Amino acid sequence: MSTHELYTEDPGEAVWQIPASGSARFSWEYDDGRERLLALYQKGKDKQWDGAKRIDWDIEVDPYDPLGTPDEALTLYGTRHWAKLTEKDKGELRRHYAAWNFSQFLHGEQGAMVCAARIVESVPDLDAKFYSATQTMDEARHAEIFGRFLHEKVGMLYPINDSLQGLLGDTLRDSRWDMPYLGMQVLIEGLALAAFGMIRDTTDKPLPKQILAYVMQDEARHVAFGRMALRDYYKQLTDAELREREEFVIEGCYLMRDRLRGVEVLENFGIPRKEAEQFSEQSEFLHLFRKLLFSRIVPCVKDIGLWGERLQRAYLDMGVFEMGDSNLDLLMSQDEEIAEALDRERFAAEESDRVAEVEAAVREGAEDTSG
Protein backbone atom coordinates (compact mmCIF):
# COMPACT_ATOMS: atom_id res chain seq x y z
CA MET A 1 0.00 0.00 0.00
CA SER A 2 1.28 3.48 -0.90
CA THR A 3 2.26 5.68 2.03
CA HIS A 4 0.06 8.44 0.56
CA GLU A 5 -3.01 6.26 1.15
CA LEU A 6 -2.20 6.12 4.89
CA TYR A 7 -1.82 9.87 5.48
CA THR A 8 -4.58 11.52 7.51
CA GLU A 9 -4.47 14.40 5.02
CA ASP A 10 -2.71 15.19 1.76
CA PRO A 11 0.97 15.94 2.57
CA GLY A 12 1.32 17.92 -0.66
CA GLU A 13 4.03 17.38 -3.23
CA ALA A 14 5.54 13.89 -3.11
CA VAL A 15 9.06 15.37 -3.08
CA TRP A 16 10.02 18.42 -0.97
CA GLN A 17 12.88 20.26 -2.63
CA ILE A 18 15.28 22.60 -0.81
CA PRO A 19 17.81 24.39 -3.04
CA ALA A 20 21.35 23.48 -1.96
CA SER A 21 23.67 26.24 -0.80
CA GLY A 22 27.21 26.32 0.43
CA SER A 23 30.36 24.55 -0.74
CA ALA A 24 31.25 20.89 -1.03
CA ARG A 25 34.67 20.50 0.61
CA PHE A 26 37.36 17.89 -0.04
CA SER A 27 40.33 17.26 2.23
CA TRP A 28 43.57 15.83 0.84
CA GLU A 29 44.95 15.11 4.33
CA TYR A 30 44.24 11.43 4.95
CA ASP A 31 46.50 10.73 7.90
CA ASP A 32 45.36 13.23 10.47
CA GLY A 33 42.39 13.51 12.77
CA ARG A 34 41.19 14.08 16.29
CA GLU A 35 41.70 10.96 18.35
CA ARG A 36 38.33 11.30 20.12
CA LEU A 37 36.48 11.70 16.84
CA LEU A 38 38.24 8.78 15.17
CA ALA A 39 37.42 6.64 18.22
CA LEU A 40 33.78 7.66 17.84
CA TYR A 41 33.97 6.74 14.13
CA GLN A 42 35.29 3.30 15.10
CA LYS A 43 32.44 2.92 17.56
CA GLY A 44 30.00 3.98 14.84
CA LYS A 45 31.32 1.17 12.61
CA ASP A 46 31.30 -1.40 15.41
CA LYS A 47 27.75 -0.59 16.51
CA GLN A 48 25.97 -0.91 13.16
CA TRP A 49 22.91 -3.20 13.33
CA ASP A 50 20.10 -4.46 11.13
CA GLY A 51 16.63 -3.19 12.04
CA ALA A 52 15.02 -6.14 10.28
CA LYS A 53 16.85 -8.61 12.57
CA ARG A 54 17.54 -6.93 15.91
CA ILE A 55 13.90 -5.89 16.40
CA ASP A 56 11.25 -8.55 16.95
CA TRP A 57 8.69 -7.55 14.30
CA ASP A 58 6.53 -10.61 15.09
CA ILE A 59 5.27 -8.88 18.28
CA GLU A 60 1.58 -8.08 17.90
CA VAL A 61 0.55 -4.43 18.30
CA ASP A 62 -2.96 -3.18 19.01
CA PRO A 63 -3.29 -0.22 16.59
CA TYR A 64 -5.81 1.37 18.97
CA ASP A 65 -3.35 1.32 21.86
CA PRO A 66 0.11 1.02 20.27
CA LEU A 67 1.98 2.68 23.15
CA GLY A 68 -0.14 1.84 26.20
CA THR A 69 -0.96 5.53 26.54
CA PRO A 70 -2.84 6.30 29.80
CA ASP A 71 -5.99 8.45 29.59
CA GLU A 72 -4.28 11.25 31.53
CA ALA A 73 -1.73 11.71 28.75
CA LEU A 74 -4.42 12.45 26.16
CA THR A 75 -4.96 16.19 25.71
CA LEU A 76 -8.76 15.85 25.75
CA TYR A 77 -8.71 14.17 29.16
CA GLY A 78 -10.67 16.24 31.69
CA THR A 79 -12.19 18.54 29.06
CA ARG A 80 -15.89 18.81 28.19
CA HIS A 81 -15.27 16.59 25.15
CA TRP A 82 -13.90 13.66 27.14
CA ALA A 83 -17.24 12.45 28.56
CA LYS A 84 -18.67 12.28 25.05
CA LEU A 85 -16.01 9.86 23.82
CA THR A 86 -16.87 6.17 23.58
CA GLU A 87 -14.21 3.55 24.29
CA LYS A 88 -13.88 3.16 20.51
CA ASP A 89 -13.32 6.92 20.18
CA LYS A 90 -10.62 6.81 22.86
CA GLY A 91 -8.88 3.97 21.01
CA GLU A 92 -9.03 5.99 17.80
CA LEU A 93 -7.56 8.98 19.66
CA ARG A 94 -4.66 6.86 20.97
CA ARG A 95 -4.04 5.59 17.45
CA HIS A 96 -3.94 9.13 16.05
CA TYR A 97 -1.55 10.36 18.74
CA ALA A 98 0.78 7.41 18.19
CA ALA A 99 0.61 8.01 14.44
CA TRP A 100 1.33 11.72 14.90
CA ASN A 101 4.26 11.15 17.26
CA PHE A 102 5.93 8.42 15.22
CA SER A 103 5.26 10.27 11.95
CA GLN A 104 7.18 13.29 13.26
CA PHE A 105 9.93 10.89 14.37
CA LEU A 106 9.98 9.40 10.87
CA HIS A 107 10.12 12.76 9.08
CA GLY A 108 12.75 14.00 11.52
CA GLU A 109 14.92 10.94 10.93
CA GLN A 110 14.78 11.47 7.17
CA GLY A 111 15.81 15.07 7.86
CA ALA A 112 18.66 13.81 10.04
CA MET A 113 19.79 11.49 7.24
CA VAL A 114 19.85 14.39 4.75
CA CYS A 115 21.66 16.65 7.26
CA ALA A 116 24.27 13.98 8.01
CA ALA A 117 24.86 13.57 4.28
CA ARG A 118 25.16 17.36 3.97
CA ILE A 119 27.78 17.34 6.75
CA VAL A 120 29.79 14.72 4.82
CA GLU A 121 29.70 17.07 1.85
CA SER A 122 30.41 20.37 3.55
CA VAL A 123 32.49 19.82 6.71
CA PRO A 124 36.20 20.57 6.05
CA ASP A 125 37.74 17.85 8.27
CA LEU A 126 38.07 14.27 7.07
CA ASP A 127 37.56 12.75 10.54
CA ALA A 128 34.15 14.48 10.72
CA LYS A 129 33.32 13.28 7.19
CA PHE A 130 34.11 9.70 8.24
CA TYR A 131 31.86 9.84 11.28
CA SER A 132 29.02 11.60 9.44
CA ALA A 133 29.04 8.81 6.89
CA THR A 134 28.28 6.27 9.64
CA GLN A 135 25.59 8.57 11.03
CA THR A 136 23.94 8.80 7.61
CA MET A 137 23.54 5.01 7.71
CA ASP A 138 22.20 5.17 11.27
CA GLU A 139 19.55 7.73 10.29
CA ALA A 140 18.54 5.67 7.25
CA ARG A 141 18.00 2.70 9.56
CA HIS A 142 15.90 4.82 11.94
CA ALA A 143 13.71 6.11 9.12
CA GLU A 144 13.27 2.53 7.89
CA ILE A 145 12.22 1.33 11.36
CA PHE A 146 9.77 4.14 12.13
CA GLY A 147 8.27 3.80 8.66
CA ARG A 148 7.80 0.07 9.10
CA PHE A 149 6.15 0.51 12.51
CA LEU A 150 3.68 3.03 11.09
CA HIS A 151 2.89 1.02 7.96
CA GLU A 152 2.63 -2.44 9.50
CA LYS A 153 1.49 -1.81 13.09
CA VAL A 154 -0.42 1.48 13.17
CA GLY A 155 -1.66 1.81 9.60
CA MET A 156 -1.76 5.62 9.65
CA LEU A 157 0.65 8.53 9.08
CA TYR A 158 0.56 12.30 9.59
CA PRO A 159 2.32 14.83 7.34
CA ILE A 160 5.33 16.66 8.77
CA ASN A 161 4.41 19.36 11.28
CA ASP A 162 4.74 22.84 9.71
CA SER A 163 7.09 24.10 12.41
CA LEU A 164 9.36 21.05 12.22
CA GLN A 165 9.44 21.44 8.44
CA GLY A 166 10.29 25.14 8.81
CA LEU A 167 13.16 24.49 11.22
CA LEU A 168 14.50 21.70 9.00
CA GLY A 169 14.27 23.97 5.95
CA ASP A 170 16.12 26.80 7.72
CA THR A 171 18.83 24.36 8.79
CA LEU A 172 19.40 23.05 5.28
CA ARG A 173 19.17 26.39 3.45
CA ASP A 174 21.97 27.94 5.49
CA SER A 175 25.28 27.87 3.61
CA ARG A 176 27.45 27.72 6.76
CA TRP A 177 28.74 24.18 7.25
CA ASP A 178 28.10 24.11 11.00
CA MET A 179 24.37 24.83 10.75
CA PRO A 180 23.25 21.25 9.97
CA TYR A 181 25.09 20.27 13.16
CA LEU A 182 23.40 22.98 15.19
CA GLY A 183 19.90 22.71 13.74
CA MET A 184 19.75 18.94 13.49
CA GLN A 185 22.24 17.42 15.95
CA VAL A 186 21.50 19.84 18.79
CA LEU A 187 17.93 21.13 18.36
CA ILE A 188 15.88 18.61 16.36
CA GLU A 189 17.73 15.53 17.66
CA GLY A 190 17.60 16.96 21.19
CA LEU A 191 13.84 17.32 20.88
CA ALA A 192 13.53 13.81 19.47
CA LEU A 193 15.62 12.29 22.27
CA ALA A 194 13.36 13.85 24.90
CA ALA A 195 10.26 12.48 23.18
CA PHE A 196 11.87 9.07 22.57
CA GLY A 197 12.93 8.84 26.21
CA MET A 198 9.54 9.80 27.59
CA ILE A 199 7.77 7.10 25.57
CA ARG A 200 10.54 4.50 26.08
CA ASP A 201 10.37 4.92 29.85
CA THR A 202 6.56 4.90 30.14
CA THR A 203 5.30 2.44 27.52
CA ASP A 204 4.46 -1.10 28.58
CA LYS A 205 4.46 -2.29 24.96
CA PRO A 206 7.59 -4.28 24.00
CA LEU A 207 7.86 -3.35 20.31
CA PRO A 208 7.92 0.46 20.62
CA LYS A 209 10.20 0.08 23.67
CA GLN A 210 12.69 -1.92 21.58
CA ILE A 211 12.54 0.54 18.69
CA LEU A 212 13.10 3.61 20.84
CA ALA A 213 15.80 2.05 23.05
CA TYR A 214 17.86 0.95 20.04
CA VAL A 215 17.44 4.24 18.20
CA MET A 216 18.47 6.17 21.33
CA GLN A 217 21.60 4.04 21.64
CA ASP A 218 22.68 5.36 18.23
CA GLU A 219 21.65 8.91 19.05
CA ALA A 220 23.96 8.94 22.08
CA ARG A 221 26.88 8.77 19.62
CA HIS A 222 25.37 11.43 17.36
CA VAL A 223 25.03 13.95 20.17
CA ALA A 224 28.63 13.25 21.25
CA PHE A 225 29.76 13.90 17.67
CA GLY A 226 27.90 17.21 17.40
CA ARG A 227 29.28 18.37 20.74
CA MET A 228 32.87 17.53 19.82
CA ALA A 229 32.80 19.13 16.39
CA LEU A 230 30.95 22.30 17.39
CA ARG A 231 32.84 22.84 20.65
CA ASP A 232 36.13 22.82 18.71
CA TYR A 233 34.80 25.11 15.97
CA TYR A 234 32.95 27.63 18.15
CA LYS A 235 36.13 28.40 20.10
CA GLN A 236 37.40 30.03 16.89
CA LEU A 237 34.37 32.26 16.20
CA THR A 238 33.98 35.96 16.96
CA ASP A 239 31.40 37.19 19.48
CA ALA A 240 29.22 38.41 16.59
CA GLU A 241 29.30 34.98 14.92
CA LEU A 242 28.43 33.27 18.18
CA ARG A 243 25.49 35.66 18.73
CA GLU A 244 24.10 34.77 15.28
CA ARG A 245 24.05 31.10 16.21
CA GLU A 246 22.51 31.84 19.58
CA GLU A 247 19.69 33.74 17.85
CA PHE A 248 19.07 30.65 15.70
CA VAL A 249 18.95 28.46 18.85
CA ILE A 250 16.54 30.82 20.66
CA GLU A 251 14.16 30.96 17.69
CA GLY A 252 14.28 27.19 17.24
CA CYS A 253 13.66 26.47 20.92
CA TYR A 254 10.61 28.75 21.13
CA LEU A 255 9.29 27.26 17.90
CA MET A 256 9.55 23.69 19.16
CA ARG A 257 8.16 24.52 22.59
CA ASP A 258 5.12 26.37 21.28
CA ARG A 259 4.23 24.51 18.09
CA LEU A 260 4.95 20.80 18.51
CA ARG A 261 1.84 19.86 20.48
CA GLY A 262 -0.16 17.53 18.24
CA VAL A 263 -2.91 20.08 17.65
CA GLU A 264 -3.43 18.45 14.23
CA VAL A 265 -4.77 15.36 16.00
CA LEU A 266 -7.53 17.29 17.78
CA GLU A 267 -8.44 19.06 14.56
CA ASN A 268 -9.02 15.65 13.00
CA PHE A 269 -11.53 15.02 15.80
CA GLY A 270 -13.52 18.10 14.84
CA ILE A 271 -12.11 20.49 17.45
CA PRO A 272 -11.37 24.03 16.16
CA ARG A 273 -7.69 24.93 16.13
CA LYS A 274 -7.96 27.75 18.68
CA GLU A 275 -9.75 25.48 21.17
CA ALA A 276 -7.28 22.65 20.48
CA GLU A 277 -4.41 25.03 21.28
CA GLN A 278 -6.09 26.02 24.56
CA PHE A 279 -6.48 22.37 25.57
CA SER A 280 -2.81 21.81 24.78
CA GLU A 281 -1.84 24.75 26.98
CA GLN A 282 -3.87 23.31 29.87
CA SER A 283 -2.54 19.74 29.57
CA GLU A 284 -0.38 18.75 32.55
CA PHE A 285 1.18 16.00 30.49
CA LEU A 286 2.28 18.48 27.82
CA HIS A 287 3.66 20.82 30.50
CA LEU A 288 5.82 17.94 31.74
CA PHE A 289 6.88 17.09 28.19
CA ARG A 290 7.86 20.70 27.51
CA LYS A 291 10.11 20.61 30.54
CA LEU A 292 11.71 17.33 29.48
CA LEU A 293 12.00 18.61 25.92
CA PHE A 294 14.97 20.73 26.94
CA SER A 295 16.73 18.16 29.13
CA ARG A 296 19.09 17.25 26.26
CA ILE A 297 19.20 20.59 24.42
CA VAL A 298 20.15 23.07 27.17
CA PRO A 299 23.25 21.25 28.53
CA CYS A 300 24.43 20.58 24.97
CA VAL A 301 24.06 24.24 23.95
CA LYS A 302 25.98 25.31 27.04
CA ASP A 303 28.67 22.68 26.46
CA ILE A 304 29.44 23.78 22.89
CA GLY A 305 29.97 27.38 24.01
CA LEU A 306 26.69 29.10 23.14
CA TRP A 307 25.80 30.65 26.49
CA GLY A 308 25.48 34.38 25.95
CA GLU A 309 23.33 36.65 28.08
CA ARG A 310 20.37 36.75 25.66
CA LEU A 311 20.29 32.95 25.36
CA GLN A 312 20.41 32.58 29.13
CA ARG A 313 17.50 35.03 29.48
CA ALA A 314 15.49 33.03 26.95
CA TYR A 315 16.05 29.82 28.91
CA LEU A 316 15.06 31.60 32.13
CA ASP A 317 11.86 32.72 30.39
CA MET A 318 11.16 29.14 29.34
CA GLY A 319 11.82 27.90 32.87
CA VAL A 320 14.61 25.54 31.78
CA PHE A 321 17.78 27.51 32.63
CA GLU A 322 18.78 25.12 35.44
CA MET A 323 18.96 22.25 32.95
CA GLY A 324 22.23 23.70 31.70
CA ASP A 325 23.89 21.91 34.62
CA SER A 326 22.47 18.48 33.69
CA ASN A 327 25.01 15.71 33.20
CA LEU A 328 24.64 14.99 29.48
CA ASP A 329 27.30 12.26 29.51
CA LEU A 330 25.37 10.40 32.22
CA LEU A 331 22.11 10.64 30.24
CA MET A 332 23.82 9.26 27.13
CA SER A 333 25.51 6.40 28.97
CA GLN A 334 22.13 5.48 30.46
CA ASP A 335 20.62 5.42 26.96
CA GLU A 336 23.30 2.98 25.82
CA GLU A 337 22.93 0.78 28.91
CA ILE A 338 19.13 0.53 28.56
CA ALA A 339 19.52 -0.79 24.99
CA GLU A 340 22.18 -3.29 26.04
CA ALA A 341 20.07 -4.48 28.99
CA LEU A 342 17.12 -4.99 26.65
CA ASP A 343 19.31 -7.12 24.39
CA ARG A 344 20.50 -9.20 27.35
CA GLU A 345 16.93 -9.81 28.53
CA ARG A 346 15.76 -10.80 25.05
CA PHE A 347 18.70 -13.12 24.38
CA ALA A 348 18.36 -14.73 27.83
CA ALA A 349 14.67 -15.39 27.17
CA GLU A 350 15.43 -16.81 23.71
CA GLU A 351 18.17 -19.03 25.15
CA SER A 352 15.78 -20.27 27.86
CA ASP A 353 13.18 -21.09 25.20
CA ARG A 354 15.76 -23.01 23.14
CA VAL A 355 16.86 -25.02 26.20
CA ALA A 356 13.22 -25.85 26.97
CA GLU A 357 12.68 -26.99 23.37
CA VAL A 358 15.75 -29.24 23.49
CA GLU A 359 14.69 -30.74 26.84
CA ALA A 360 11.18 -31.36 25.51
CA ALA A 361 12.60 -33.05 22.39
CA VAL A 362 14.86 -35.25 24.55
CA ARG A 363 11.88 -36.26 26.74
CA GLU A 364 9.77 -37.09 23.70
CA GLY A 365 12.63 -39.13 22.24
CA ALA A 366 13.04 -41.05 25.54
CA GLU A 367 9.30 -41.74 25.71
CA ASP A 368 9.25 -43.01 22.12
CA THR A 369 12.22 -45.32 22.86
CA SER A 370 10.67 -46.70 26.03
CA GLY A 371 7.37 -47.17 24.26
Image (cartoon, helix red, strand yellow):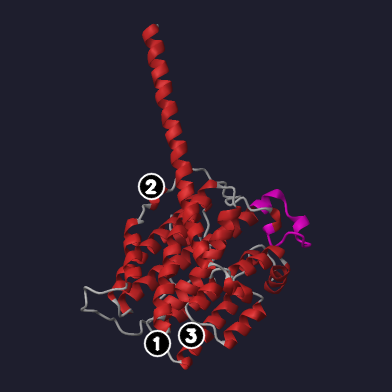
Q: Amino acid at mark 3?
A: Arg
Mark nearest the camera among 3 and 2 is 3
Label 2's element? helix
Q: Is residue 63 above or below residue 38?
A: above
Q: Which residue is mark 3?
A: 245
Q: Position of residue 233 (x, y in %)?
A: 39, 82
Q: CA distance from mark 3 to mark 2?
A: 41 Å
| Residue toward you, 204 or 347 | 347
Q: CA distance from mark 1 to mark 2?
A: 44 Å
Q: Position of residue 145 (x, y in %)?
A: 43, 56
Identify the residue at horizontal 37%, vertical 15% (top origin). 365
Mark nearest the camera among 1 and 2 is 1
Q: Is residue 191 above or below residue 93?
A: below
Let me know if residue 81 is in the magenta part.
Answer: yes
Q: Which residues are magenta?
A: 73-91
* Residue 74's disc number: none
Q: Which residue is mark 1?
A: 236
Q: Is 146 left, or right, of 278 in this rendering?
A: left
Let me know if residue 189 is in the magenta part.
Answer: no
Identify the residue at horizontal 63%, vertical 84% (top origin). 313
Q: Which residue is mark 2?
A: 53
| Residue toward you, 231 or 8 | 231
Label 1's element? loop
Identify the residue at horizontal 66%, vertical 81% (top origin). 317
Q: Position of residue 350 (x, y in %)?
A: 44, 36
Residue occupying the far top of the picture: 371
